[in-house]
Amino acid sequence: MKFDVLTLFPDMVAGPLNDSIIGRGIERGLIELNLWNIRDYAVDRHRTVDDSPYGGGAGMVMKVEPLYSCIETVKAKRPEARVILTSPRGVPFSQEMAKELAGLTELIIVCGRYEGIDERVTELCIDQEVSIGDFVLTGGELAAMVIVDAVGRLLPGVLGCDDSSVEESFSDGLLEYPQYTRPPEFHGLKVPEVLLSGNHQEIAKWRRQQAILRTVAARPELLANAQLTPAERTLVAH
Ligand code: ADE
């Protein structure tokens, strides 16, 4: 899958994603990550990319021309691409959206900065505005990295079978059960007996219970859409 990230700070995005699992995906040719510096598309002597907002108010707005020209240049190379703008006013990013985006062959991510981008760019070029949470970052670069990471790891072959994405938080609408590895006791805390039993049916049952308990405690609102049996539904209702 091809990711194209359009940003004023390409160095911020390049480094971290080249490490670890996404980096391995890039090395193997499963992921292509291209970075575009929006400033390269500014035409004036000072390479201006922002301006004060019409109507007044604090902060600066990303100018139409360089941004439009950068997006259109990249779009011309990626005829299949969806174009996303990272913005705190976008639709919330989720595992479900990550799965949907992982079905695409090309994704263009435009990183917002300053107080926002000129609305006409959004109207002309952007398919979807996406927020990674109800908080405000200084810019969309971290959000773009979150999206590339969450989508990239779902692409076939990117995760080894040791770190499969099939059995994980959100796959059944529940948070993940607790995990343990050696030693069996640490600072007086023991690994639950059942995990040492070798009884796979009992282990699965325990993990399922734990996943439900965790979800009840930390994210009860997820339960409404979780895949629960009627018996489990009755249990969490109490
Ligand atoms: N840019 C600034 N804040 C953001 C957020 N929460 N999500 C996506 N992009 C952003």
Image: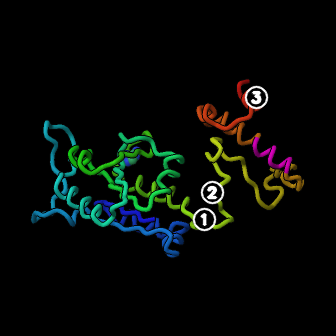
Q: Where's residue 162, x and y in %?
A: 68, 65
Name the colour scheme.
rainbow
Segment tinted magenta in the rendering: 201-208
Query: For numbered disc 2, what is the local secondary structure?
Result: loop
For the point 61% across and 45% down, which residue is it? 170
Q: Is residue 58 left or right of residue 91?
A: left
Q: Position of residue 136 (x, y in %)?
A: 38, 43
* 135 with respect to 223 (left or right): left
Q: Which mark is residue 235?
A: 3
Q: Nearer the viewer, residue 28 or 184?
A: 28
The picture places residue 36, in percent across and down from the top left corner, at 30, 65
Residues 211 and 31: in front is 31
Asked if the residue at tag 2 contacts the one at tag 1, i.e. Cβ–Cβ closer than 8 Å, the answer is: yes
* Comes first in the chain, label 1 or label 3: 1
Kindly identify which residue carries mark 1: 159
Determine whether 199 is above or below 226 in the image.
below
Residue at mark 2: 165
